[in-house]
Amino acid sequence: MKDVADWRQSKKSRLIIIIGLLILVGVIAFFFEKTRMWMLGIGAVLLIALGLEATNTDVDLGKLLETGSLQESMIQRDENGKALYGATCEENVYNCSNFKTQSEAQEVYDTCTSAENRDRHGLDRDGNGVACQSLPTGN
């Protein structure tokens, strides 16, 4: 299961998928006149996705709707394009080595911890509510 998570978080994989979908949409739009307007709309959305991916930018739409602030809904990524701050709360996606500081790990821990599913990523091994205690503190 970890291999799937690594593949999904690979910037190169996401770029290849977006470009492949753009090509598919272009072919469909070219050969099927009745779908052309739909394909142009889908192509525009894919171009936006490509631009966001190429610039390591991402937006948490749920947080955007909740707060109304684009700045607060931005998701930070590392140099490899891997999302850092609670972008995904799937089981065992992050570990302490994904973070530079304890506060970064704590933010993901706080975002992804719920009453039903405590510590989805295993960031708090001793169960005291503090994630990745071995990392340096920071803001």
Image (tube, rainbow, N blue to C red):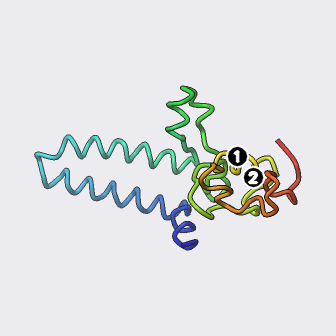
Of the residues shown, which amino acid type is indicated by label 1?
A: Asp
Nearer to me, 104 or 92? 92
Q: Secondary structure at mark 2?
A: helix
**Marked residue nearer the N-terminal end (1 or 2):** 2
- In the image, is 127 to the left or to the right of 42? right
What's the CA distance linking mark 1 and mark 2? Answer: 9 Å
The image shows residue 22 at horizontal and vertical percentages of 33, 54
- Residue drawn at 68 percent across, 57 percent down: 119
- Residue drawn at 22 percent across, 57 percent down: 27
Q: From the image, tell me which residue sits under label 2.
A: 105
- Residue drawn at 72 percent across, 60 percent down: 98
For the residues carrying marks 1 and 2, which lies nearer the camera in this image?
Answer: 1
Of the residues shown, which amino acid type is indicated by label 2?
A: Ala
Instruction: Locate the C terminus by quadrant.
Output: top right
Instruction: Locate the N terminus by quadrant.
Output: bottom right
Q: Is residue 107 above or below residue 93?
A: above
